[in-house]
Image: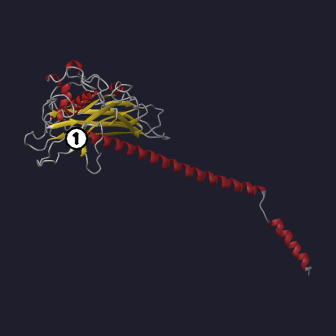
């Protein structure tokens, strides 16, 4: 029998010889680990890219729906200013009558046709240009009043291409000089109406110095119910409501004038009429990014039955609009082309998209996803009611 100490030493030596890994084993383990890590990384990268693409697609759809719904909502309010008769001139030194609904400017001696611009500017009320005149050139405040009165009655909406809007932007121009430049290949539209809530109502703006407001006579006594007033002096708006109770005034609505267009950086922009100590001005707000194109197709009722008989695009140079087209427009279809915020790898692009009956080409190297969104809206055109 071997001594215990010798047996223990031999066992320890054999254990030491059998423990640990060889170089080959280590290399194999590292290779396997690297393959696993690369696989997990690739899986994570693919999942992350897929999630990013889904987010891009979701944001693209969200932007397109939001843009179309917002434009359709404002278009649906065209002609919203009540059942008016003849605008009065409270707040100005000009004697009534001023304009009757549906009246063409050439048919009245209240205006100097030589100085009239038809159709009117997109940004009304700023008196930044000689819009039109009554006899001698009116004061700045009178010109603002005249522009707004004419716009709300004769041209409650106005649309053309971006090139026409470019001419109104800059120092001393109606839209001002702090306004993003429009994309000339895209359309714009302007709307003039009353606000959807009355001054003093919960959630509605309070009266603002320098702004213009609309009011309609409700009491059918000494004045005709439906008479229309426009003024930048709220204290002068004292028409009664339908109950004919002394001291109970008819609602007063703020005059809304807005212009929507696409700027050169592919933002959908809203110009909103506001006022400060210097008078009426327009403030720009960028609403949605990635809007490449805005088009409008207007439905024209040629036989007076309230149904569109033909479709026209206000931006068309081959089929220009006439004054009767504005009066007879009863519907509008909004077309929007909206691009994803980021490029999407592996996307398959069509050669072109169809927008408002025209081809919208897309470069073969372009990697942005696009959505064409449309909305059709019936409009209550006060220049030619037929419903």
| Vertical side of 246 occupied by 90: above or below | above
- Residue carrying label 1: 235
Where in the figure is residue 301, as x and y percent of width and height? 17, 32
Where in the figure is residue 35, as x and y percent of width and height? 64, 52
Name the residue nearer the viewer: 25 or 173.
Answer: 173
Where in the figure is residue 322, as x and y percent of width and height? 21, 24
Q: Quadrant of the N terminus?
A: bottom right
| Vertical side of 44 occupied by 157: above or below | above
**Residue drawn at the location 73% of the way across and 54% of the way down:** 27
**Residue drawn at the location 42% of the way across and 38% of the way down:** 290
Name the residue nearer the viewer: 85 or 52.
Answer: 85
- Tell whether 48 sits left or right of 242: right
Q: Can residue 190 be seen in the rendering of this structure? A: yes
Q: Quadrant of residue 146?
A: top left
**Residue drawn at the location 36% of the way across and 35% of the way down:** 283
- Tell whether 125 sits left or right of 337: left
Name the outermost residue toward the left: 221
Q: Quadrant of residue 96?
A: top left
Q: Quadrant of residue 165?
A: top left
Which secondary structure, mark 1?
helix
Q: Can residue 80 be seen in the rendering of this structure? A: no
Q: Quadrant of the C terminus?
A: top left
């Amino acid at each position: 029998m071997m001594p215990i100490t010798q047996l223990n030493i031999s066992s320890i030596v054999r254990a030491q010889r059998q423990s640990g890994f060889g170089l080959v084993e280590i290399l194999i383990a590292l290779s396997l680990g690297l393959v696993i890590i690369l696989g997990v990384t690739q899986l994570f990268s693919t999942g992350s890219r897929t999630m990013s693409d889904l987010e891009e697609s979701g944001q693209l759809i969200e932007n397109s729906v939001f843009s179309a719904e917002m434009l359709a909502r404002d278009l649906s309010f065209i002609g919203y200013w009540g059942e008016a008769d003849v605008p009065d001139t409270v707040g100005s030194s000009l004697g009534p009558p001023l304009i009757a609904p549906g009246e063409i400017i050439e048919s009245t001696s209240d205006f100097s046709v030589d100085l009239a611009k038809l159709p009117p500017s997109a940004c009304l009320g700023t008196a930044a240009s000689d819009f039109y005149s009554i006899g001698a050139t009116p004061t700045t405040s009178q010109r603002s009043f005249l522009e707004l009165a004419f716009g709300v009655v004769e041209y409650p909406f106005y649309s053309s291409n971006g090139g026409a809007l470019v001419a109104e932007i800059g120092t001393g121009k109606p839209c001002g000089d702090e306004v993003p430049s429009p994309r000339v290949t895209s359309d714009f539209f302007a709307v003039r109406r009353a606000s959807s809530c009355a001054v003093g109502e919960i959630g509605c703006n309070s009266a603002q110095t320098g702004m213009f407001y609309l009011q309609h006579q409700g009491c059918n006594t000494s004045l005709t119910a439906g008479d229309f007033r426009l003024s930048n002096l709220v204290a002068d708006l004292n028409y009664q409501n339908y109950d004919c109770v002394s001291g109970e005034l008819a609602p007063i609505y703020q005059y809304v004038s807005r212009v929507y267009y696409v700027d050169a950086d592919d933002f959908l922009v809203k110009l909103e009429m506001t006022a400060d100590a210097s008078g009426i001005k327009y403030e720009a707000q960028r609403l949605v990014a990635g809007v490449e194109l805005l088009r409008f197709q207007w439905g024209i009722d040629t036989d007076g039955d309230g149904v569109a008989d033909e479709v026209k695009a206000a931006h068309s140079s081959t089929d220009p609009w006439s004054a009767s087209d504005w009066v007879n427009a009863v519907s509008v279809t909004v077309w929007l082309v909206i691009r994803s915020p980021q490029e999407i790898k592996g996307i398959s692009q069509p050669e072109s998209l169809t927008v408002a009956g025209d081809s919208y080409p897309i470069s073969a190297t372009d990697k942005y996803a696009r959505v064409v969104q449309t909305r059709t809206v019936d409009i209550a055109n006060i220049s030619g009611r037929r419903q």
